């Protein structure tokens, strides 16, 4: 109970603690994605159409944000997710960067007391906290290498490794992704090293009017560990 009480106190103080950062904010981003499926690192969450809102504030290399995914189907609501994240980006010569992030993945519809926001109990609560680092090479070869470590609520301390590279064909932006779980993981459901996220995505703006274009995205994703593939399609809205 003391643990929960302290966390609630911190949450109550967050608006005050964030005020200096917010007053110095250089940009605010808000919007939402709409996808036929929410597939994350090769795993389908909710098996239904999902709406994914996002709100973030940036100042310098720092970004604070919140992101969610909500199923439009009652059957898929158990996978609803609301995250809070913080990241810092360091620019490198030639348009490359080094990025660090911490994310609190929260699943509010986890049954019983485990789903309460104040429940950060290890191996019982609905919060999973991850540390992630990535390096993006210069524009001449913009390969991104990332490593993510689940550091809370995961007895296996799961490690996820990913490589991705963007390219284009004609006026369509494409991206290739290869993601693996580094070993046995109850969180990802793997028994050993496993290729869980092999995919290619395509994105293109659909011009609606002279001043408005609708970003469209499609992607093929294969999880060789679960022996399942997915074809996702969606669009994004933002001011």
Image (spheres, helix red, strand yellow):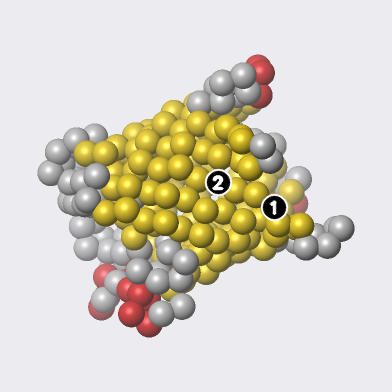
Would residue 12 be visible to someone looking at this image?
no
Residue 157 location (% of width, % of height)? 23, 42
Quadrant in the picture for the C terminus: bottom right
Q: Which mark is residue 202?
A: 2
Task: Classify residue 60 by image quadrant.
Answer: top right
Mark 2, Cα crowd under 10 Å, few <14 / some 14-19 / many 20+, is some
Residue 11 location (% of width, % of height)? 49, 63
132 and 48: which is toward the camera: 48
Residue 28 location (% of width, % of height)? 71, 53
Considering only vertical position in the picture, is 236 above or below 177?
below
Would residue 173 be visible to someone looking at this image?
yes
Considering only vertical position in the picture, is 135 above or below 234?
above
* Residue at left offset 45%, top offset 71%: 49
Q: Which mark is residue 76?
A: none
Considering only vertical position in the picture, is 154 above or below 239?
above
Task: Classify residue 208 by image quadrant.
Answer: bottom right
Q: Is residue 118 left or right of residue 183?
A: right
Pick out the residue farthest to the left: 191
* Residue at left offset 61%, top offset 35%: 168
Residue 162 location (% of width, % of height)? 38, 35
Question: How far is mark 2 from mark 1, CA to CA?
Answer: 11 Å
Mark 1, Cα crowd under 10 Å, few <14 / some 14-19 / many 20+, is some
Q: Dot 1 lies on which element?
A: strand
Q: Dot 2 lies on which element?
A: strand
213 and 191: which is toward the camera: 213
120 and 230: which is toward the camera: 230
Q: Is residue 233 left or right of residue 180?
A: right
* Residue at left offset 27%, top offset 54%: 228
Residue at label 1? 205
Q: Is residue 114 left or right of residue 235?
A: left
* Residue at left offset 29%, top offset 72%: 110
């Amino acid at each position: 109970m003391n643990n929960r009480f302290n966390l609630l106190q911190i949450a109550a103080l967050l608006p005050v603690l964030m005020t200096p950062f917010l007053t110095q904010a250089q940009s605010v981003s808000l919007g939402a994605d709409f996808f036929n499926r929410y597939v994350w690192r090769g795993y389908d969450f909710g098996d239904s159409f999902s709406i994914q809102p996002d709100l973030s504030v940036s100042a310098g290399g720092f970004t604070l944000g919140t992101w969610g995914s909500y199923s439009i189907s009652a059957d898929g609501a158990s996978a609803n997710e609301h995250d809070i994240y913080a990241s810092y980006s360091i620019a490198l010569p030639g348009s490359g960067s080094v990025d660090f992030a911490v994310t609190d993945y929260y699943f509010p519809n986890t049954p019983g007391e485990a789903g309460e926001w104040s429940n950060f109990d290890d191996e019982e609560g609905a919060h999973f906290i991850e540390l992630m680092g990535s390096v993006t090479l210069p524009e001449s070869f913009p390969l991104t290498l990332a490593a993510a470590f689940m550091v809370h609520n995961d007895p296996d301390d799961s490690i996820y490794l990913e490589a991705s590279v963007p390219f284009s064909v004609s006026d369509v932006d494409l991206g290739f992704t290869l993601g693996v779980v580094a070993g046995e993981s109850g969180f990802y459901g793997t028994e050993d090293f496993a290729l869980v996220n092999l995919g290619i995505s395509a994105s293109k703006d659909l011009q609606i009017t002279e001043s408005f274009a609708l970003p469209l995205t499609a992607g093929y994703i294969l999880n060789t560990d679960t022996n399942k593939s997915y074809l996702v399609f969606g669009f994004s809205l933002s001011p």
